Image: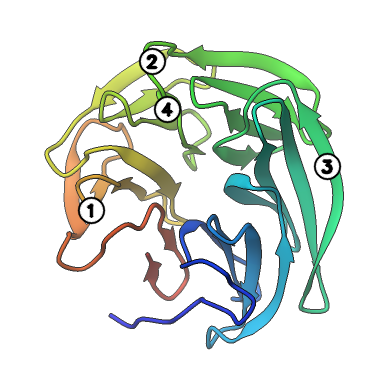
Amino acid sequence: MSEYGVKIKSDLKPCNIYAICELPSRETLILDYNNDEVKLFDKKYKLLSNCKVLNYSYDMCLISPNELVVTTNKHDDLHFLQMITVRNDKLEKENKIQLPHRCVGIARHEGDLYVTSGRALYQYTLTGTLVKKLYEYTTGDDTVYSCAVNLTDDKIYVTNQHTHQLLTLAMDGTVISTFTDIDLKGPRGVHVTTRGQVLVCGDKSNARIQVDNEGKKKLATLATKRMVSMTHVQCYTAAALIL
């Protein structure tokens, strides 16, 4: 296991990685929550570019080979999807789409975006038009935190930090199954790899696990508290699992 520093000279606080994406060119994008920045690194994790985002930015996803969307918020009343383009190894902020609710987790599937608010899951078009509220769980905070869509286009995975669960939903929002495990306490990030593997981060248990595509059974523990601490996400690239 290799370790790379992502702190840059302009950072005023310790880095806190909330999201990771890999571009087709094998460059890595990192969302640093504490420093309100998206950072772009080359294959050797040398900084290429960085850009500021709003104070409460939780997640990001690619919508094209060189475009990404960041869920970002300012205080309790301003919530946006911030579009960013990677152009000539530089990050350039584009337009923002304002939404009427908190923006937390995000996933892209075909021509739609799936956005969580902390208590609900919404389906939007890429231009920000609401398609449908798919799922809601209002008892507690961060009950609908992060989301991911599987490769067979028939399931959505959602993490519930309040109940320490991974939920598997049908595409219409119907709950198919719920999963709990001793290594899954305070789950945050959920990620579907290019091979269809489902990976989940247990934030409070400091563990990263793989579950089956049905979201019902743990297949492996990929990392434990001895290996990682206070990491919220993972990204399975063509070469490695990034924590």
Which is nearer the N-term, disc 1 or disc 4?
Answer: 4
- The residue beneath circle 4 is 142
Q: Upstream in the sequence, badge 3 or badge 2?
A: 3
Q: Position of residue 120 (x, y in %)?
A: 52, 19
Label 3 vs 1, first from the N-terminus? 3
**What is the residue that sits farthest to the right in this orientation?**
95
Give the image quarter of residue 49.
Answer: bottom right
Amino acid carrying label 1: it is Asn
Image-quadrant location for residue 46? bottom right
Residue that label 3 marks: 96
Q: Residue 175 bears which disc, if any?
A: 2
Of the residues under marks 2 and 4, which one precedes in the sequence? 4
Q: Residue furthest left?
A: 182
Q: Is residue 194 above or below residue 104?
A: below
Q: Nearer the viewer, mark 3 or mark 2?
A: 3
- Graded by Cα atoms within 10 Å as few (under 14), some (14 to 19) or many (20 or more), the crowding at tag 2 reads some
Q: Secondary structure at mark 1?
A: loop
N-term-proximal mark, 4 vs 3 = 3
Question: In the rendering, which numbered label is found on residue 206?
Answer: 1
Q: Residue 70 in the image: x percent, y percent?
A: 67, 48
Residue 56, picture quadrant: top right
